[in-house]
């Protein structure tokens, strides 16, 4: 019996030693997420999800900032929610170790002109750079899969290139970017959806070519883009739905191409597009909802495939907004880039 007790004590001692060794060999175990510490001008904590440091707050009047790569021998991996909100710096360099920028991290940094985003960045949350009104350019990393709600809304961006891995441009992502002139989708883009008011009020946007992968343009996505002249789509476009109010009062719009697979043109989708000269339909008659083309050019020409001409006339001519001065003509097989 004495031998059994000895063995039991010995086993417990071995387990205790192994547990202590595990603690000693794993540096992250000595950190706790709820412990807030200070390093220079930064407040930070341990982030268990990324096994790194999360910047929580910053307090300095410096104009140019370089966030450290490491704190306490651990990589800086996360920029926390509201961490730099309303700071007055002009430039900031984020280390390559950062994989996540949380919501409103740079909210209203109104003097920020330049930011270098790390190539390893995977996620930017809602309103991360909202109302950075002096931010004129940014290069988006290839690892991003989503542009979150309001992420660059009300900034001074002039051009944006959407990485091919992005599948969703969420609601209001670029809303109120009054100086935005160019939106470019990389080749083999995977964008499926452009969300609610994503580019609303981008007054200087002139032209956009949508990728083949796009399936849905959501409500009010391009509302009030008044200098937008032409909508283009890649060959074999997968677009199925043009949402309500999506191009509402795009008063400079002249040519619209409706891809073959479009099934729905929702309410007031092209309402108030008074300069529209030609709309080119490539496929069967989609469901055209109430006032989809109301208040457009009274002499517009609807170009439709010859085999569906009767169906289009039946659908369009019964609409309350349709006028006798409008025309529906057959085009046979036509290409979306024709301007005639």
Image (cartoon, grey):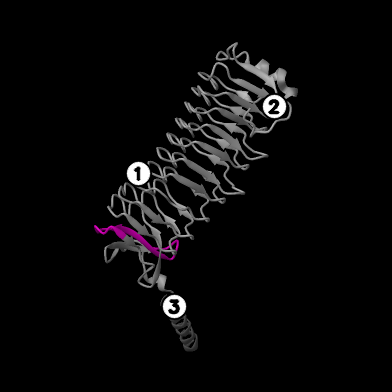
Q: Is residue 213 left or right of residue 42?
A: right
Q: Is residue 56 magenta?
A: yes
- In the rendered image, is residue 240 in sight? yes
Q: Is residue 74 magenta?
A: no
Up/down of 314 relative to 116, above or below: above
Q: Position of residue 56 (x, y in %)?
A: 32, 58
**Does the residue at mark 1 contact the one at mark 2 (Cβ under 8 Å)?**
no
Which residue does the numbered mark 3 point to in the structure image? 25
Q: Looking at the image, tell me whether mark 3 or mark 1 is earlier in sequence order.
A: 3
- Give the total number of marks visible in the rendering: 3
Look at 52% across and 39% down and name the residue there.
Answer: 194
Crowding near the residue tagged with mark 2, few <14, some 14–19, many ≥20 C-alpha atoms within 10 Å: some
Q: Which residues are magenta?
A: 47-64
Q: Which element carries disc 2, helix, strand or loop?
A: loop
- Distance between the alpha carbons at the discs numbered 3 and 1: 44 Å
Which residue does the numbered mark 2 point to in the structure image? 284
Crowding near the residue tagged with mark 1, few <14, some 14–19, many ≥20 C-alpha atoms within 10 Å: many
Q: Nearer the viewer, mark 2 or mark 3?
A: 2
């Amino acid at each position: 019996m004495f031998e059994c007790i000895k063995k039991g004590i010995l086993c417990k001692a071995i387990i205790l030693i192994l547990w202590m060794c595990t603690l000693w060999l794993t540096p992250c175990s000595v950190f706790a997420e709820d412990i807030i510490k200070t390093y220079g001008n930064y407040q930070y904590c341990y982030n268990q999800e990324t096994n790194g440091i999360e910047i929580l707050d910053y307090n300095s009047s410096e104009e140019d900032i370089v966030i450290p790569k490491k704190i306490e021998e651990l990589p800086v991996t996360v920029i926390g929610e509201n961490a730099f909100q309303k700071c007055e710096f002009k430039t900031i360099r984020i280390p390559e170790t950062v994989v996540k920028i949380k919501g409103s991290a740079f909210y209203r940094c109104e003097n920020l002109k330049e930011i270098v985003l790390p190539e390893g960045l995977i996620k930017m949350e809602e309103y991360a750079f909202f109302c950075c009104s002096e931010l004129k350019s940014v290069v988006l990393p290839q690892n991003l899969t989503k542009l979150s709600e309001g992420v660059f809304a009300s900034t001074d961006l002039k051009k944006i290139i959407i990485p091919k891995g992005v599948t969703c441009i969420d609601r209001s992502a670029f809303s109120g970017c009054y100086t935005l002139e160019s939106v470019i989708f990389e080749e083999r883009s995977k964008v499926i959806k452009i969300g609610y008011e994503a580019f609303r009020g981008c007054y200087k946007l002139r032209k956009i070519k949508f990728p083949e992968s796009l399936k849905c343009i959501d409500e009010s996505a391009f509302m009030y883009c008044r200098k937008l002249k032409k909508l283009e789509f890649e060959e074999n476009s997968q677009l199925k739905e043009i949402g309500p109010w999506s191009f509402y009062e795009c008063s400079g719009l002249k040519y619209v191409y409706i891809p073959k697979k479009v099934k729905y043109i929702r309410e007031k989708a092209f309402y108030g597009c008074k300069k529209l000269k030609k709309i080119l339909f490539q496929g069967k008659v989609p469901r055209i909802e109430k006032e989809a083309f109301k208040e457009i050019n009274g002499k517009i020409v609807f170009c439709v495939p010859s085999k569906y001409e009767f169906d289009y006339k039946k659908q369009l001519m019964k609409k309350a907004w349709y006028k006798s001065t409008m025309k529906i003509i057959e085009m046979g097989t036509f290409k979306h880039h024709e301007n005639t």
